Amino acid sequence: MDVGEIEPRLCRIRGNLFKESSYINKIAVGDEVEVDLTAAEDAGWILRMFPRRTKLSRRPSVGYPEQVLVSNADTLLMVASMRTPPFRGGLVDRLLVAASCGGLEPVLILSKADLATSDEISPIENLYSSLGYTILVTSIPESRGLESLRDLLQNRTTVLSGHSGVGKSSLIKALFPDWEIRIGRISNKSGKGRHTTRMAEMFRIPIGGFIVDTPGIRELEPLVTPNELDSHYVEFVPYLGQCKFKGCTHIHEPQCLIKDAVASKKITEQRYKSYCTLFESL
Ligand SMILES: Nc1nc2c(ncn2[C@@H]2O[C@H](COP(=O)(O)OP(=O)(O)OP(=O)(O)O)[C@@H](O)[C@H]2O)c(=O)[nH]1
Ligand SMILES: [Mg+2]
Ligand SMILES: [Zn+2]
């Protein structure tokens, strides 16, 4: 698909297409649909939606079970700076769960490396790479990691995520200086909380592929039930089903293998804490 070569068309959804859908939004950025363009010159009808290969979903307002933020994306790119703002593992872990639930490949960027020492960077880098995740250290003033980031973006659909100020727009601008940048336009502070900030936008990048910017991702509560949360913490998986109590939450039960693994440092305190926090919030 090359949306740059075709004229955009405003399409309406055929009347009964989503009658039985329980999604808060019928259609999401990235959805692939069959359209009928014969009815009018500048408009069309959405006839059918193809099954979603991946989806990034969150728990929305009460009464709806699911809100799909982005569908069919390949990568969830999580940008986290070392300082200004300080690294926050909680959001990274929440996003990892969301990626795992929706079938996206997570990639972690540790940005602004020039503002941190290697003693600060290494523990985080080691932790997430030992869990098997792709992790990249970047610094724009030092041109560090930019070529690798470029390779990760090429010919793929990537969802950008991370707290405000971590350097998402700067990274895109450093990679594509001539590209008329629109990333972040909808996520400026004055727009926060307004309806528009809920919307994701997809941009075609000059090297092939797409970037999706979705402000809603910052307060993302992954769509996962508390009792299946443990299966999305990769380092927990080898121990699951072996705790004394069936359905162990690994929080207050005795003879819990996860807690044992934390005590023997096979699972880090940091990840275990983020699990507990996320569990409580669900
Ligand atoms: N020292 C240093 N500063 C950086 C780096 N990358 C970005 N910055 C600075 O960090 C600030 C925030 O960068 P942005 O790119 O606007 O951050 P953002 O993630 O797009 O923020 P939102 O659009 O609010 O979500 C800017 O002042 C950048 O100049 C870096 O690698 N090193
Ligand atoms: Mg930005
Ligand atoms: Zn347990």
Image (cartoon, rainbow, N blue to C red):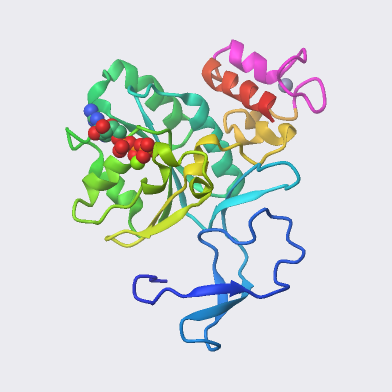
Q: Position of residue 193 (x, y in %)?
A: 52, 39
Q: Position of residue 271 (x, y in %)?
A: 55, 22
Magenta residues, start to end: 242-265
Is residue 182 located in the magenta-colored stretch of the structure? no
> Residue 100, relative to residue 265: is it above or below?
below
> Residue 236, relative to residue 107: is it above or below?
above
Q: Position of residue 278 (x, y in %)?
A: 63, 27
Name the magenta segment's main secondary structure: loop
Q: Is residue 12 visible?
A: yes
Is residue 243 located in the magenta-colored stretch of the structure? yes
Give the position of the N terminus as an image quadrant.
bottom left
Residue toward you, 11 or 257: 11
Residue toward you, 133 or 162: 162
Residue at image point 31% right, 58% down: 205
Residue at image point 47% right, 86% down: 41
What number of labels is visible? Answer: 0
Residue at image point 43% right, 36% down: 162
Residue at image point 33% right, 17% down: 120
